[in-house]
Amino acid sequence: MDGKGHILVLPFPAQGHVTPFMELSHRLVDHGFEVTFVNTEAYHSLVLAALPQASGGETALGAGIHLASIPDGLTGDDDRKDIGKVTDACSRHMPGHLERLVAEMEASGRPKVKWLVGDVVLGSCFEVAKKLGIRVAVFWTASAACLAFMLSAPKLVEEGVINDMGWAERDETFQLGPGMPKLPTSQMPWMDGTGTPAGPPALFELITRFEKFNSLAEVVVCNSFNEAEVGTFKYLPDILPIGPLFADGEFRKPVGNFLPEDERCIKWLDAQPDRSVVYVAFGSMAIFDPRQFVELAEGLELTGRPFIWVVRPDFTVGLSKTWLHEFNQRVADRGMIVSWCSQQQVLAHRAVACFVSHCGWNSTMEGVRNGVPFVCWPYFCDQYLDRSYITNVWRVGLAVSPRADGIVTKEELRSKVAQVLGDDGIKERARLFMDASRRSIRGSGSSCENFNKFLANDPSPARVLDRLVKTVGADWWHLIDSSLSPPLAPSHLPSLPLTSPPA
């Protein structure tokens, strides 16, 4: 990004996207840029309401970040957790509103926007940027491996692993390349809970749009670091990992929460012994039915450990008030249930022993950066991929195993928490990984250097997503066997390596 100037930041309207985009915005401001952060109107109001009023409300963001909003095309009755509906509405309605917003800012005397840092899910807005002479950078908020899987979809169709709707054709586990996570075909990162066998999941449909927008983005950055995804970055070298991102070391800068943080958490943690607390959070999207909620709650009770449990207002419905009252009475002396908290600050606290997590990528990076072992409980999409990183590649946690009916029992949760906290190898690897992540964002660390490359970006005429697509489409299947000697000639490339799932 040549010179200091005005940057338009445009995240997909979901908490898991807004948070890393806000963390990136703080970094940009620290380097002298002015940022206009654009949310949809629905979430803009939530972010404003959740800002810490004691710090002056919106002024808590600092002088360099300005909040703005545009409509998302949905009505008040529409479900904004329906990924397909939100994606479709935003793609159709937001470009025009974004163009008007840019015009209004310039008319009011604001500096001309030089760059749009956007979510690839909102790629339709990239066309507006180019029309207005604004350069485009993509911020990929999931793992780089997730992007690799997305870009590999055409090849997976060709190999007969999935059909052209994104659904598995074979019940197998496969790996794109050495050092990358293994994944069952039933748990592809586009499995978002939408679609039917007659129609694709909403996220799979997005893949077809990548090619349309690949000529518009000049650079792609992601919230990861080299040591975390060595295998992936070997084959997608044009992605710049600049993470793990965080707003500031003192946890004073807001990160765009949709719910107010419960400020009692840290004081409560201060009163707990070192490495004693189980922290439980399932992000902003997961919904538990009452049966699973009760099993989770009673599992935490069975651990005998103090715990903090984040329970959003919409986390479950239909729960027995009598049961909840009795549960709260039983755990009142060692459990804290909150609707939202400063997760980075909680995970950084000396009292936290392990993290029961849905394995969203932000949570994964936050746990890694603070050396906290995981109990993995993924819900959908790329969370299964992240679980594979945690349990199979990095080996800093264990995964719960549901029963045949999909329920994770209280006994299973108690067992996995005990196993993680009793495994010195897991805890040591978590510590070493924490050290590696922190080195990456200091001084001459890899993520720090990549961030400087991002700021000084002077792209070649070939656009980065175009290069990524060509890398995966033409060379990937040879590269994954590059460890073989001698290298295989292109005419003798093997089929996609597949292994049967463990019994």
Image (tube, grey):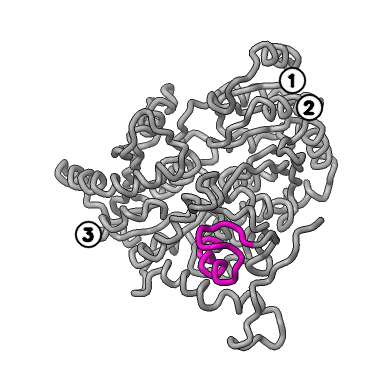
Bin the neighbour count of mark 1 within 10 Å (Cα to Cα): few under 14, some 14-19, many 20 and up.
some
Q: Which residue is mark 3?
A: 131
Query: Which disc is residue 334 wearing?
Result: 1
The residue tagged with tag 2: helix, strand or loop?
loop
Q: Is residue 422 above or below residue 178?
A: above
- Give the amino acid at mark 2: Arg
Picture disc at residue 434: none
Image quadrant for the C terminus?
A: bottom right
Q: Nearer the viewer, mark 1 or mark 3?
A: 3
Q: What x and y, as percent, mark residue 160?
A: 60, 68
Label 2 to label 1, Cα distance in Å?
Answer: 7 Å
Q: Label 2 neighbourhood size at 10 Å, few (<14), some (14-19), many (20+)?
A: some
Residue closest to the eye, 98 or 495:
495
Vertical position of residue 442 compared to residue 400: above or below: below
SS category of the residue bearing label 1:
loop
Residue 500 percent across, percent down from the top left: 75, 63
Amino acid carrying label 1: it is Arg
Camera-side residue: 242 or 153?
153
| Residue in view at x 57 percent, y 28 percent | 315
Q: Residue at x 54, y 40 (%)?
A: 249
Question: How much space separates mark 1 and mark 3, taking CA atoms?
Answer: 57 Å
Vertical side of 372 occupied by 441: above or below: below
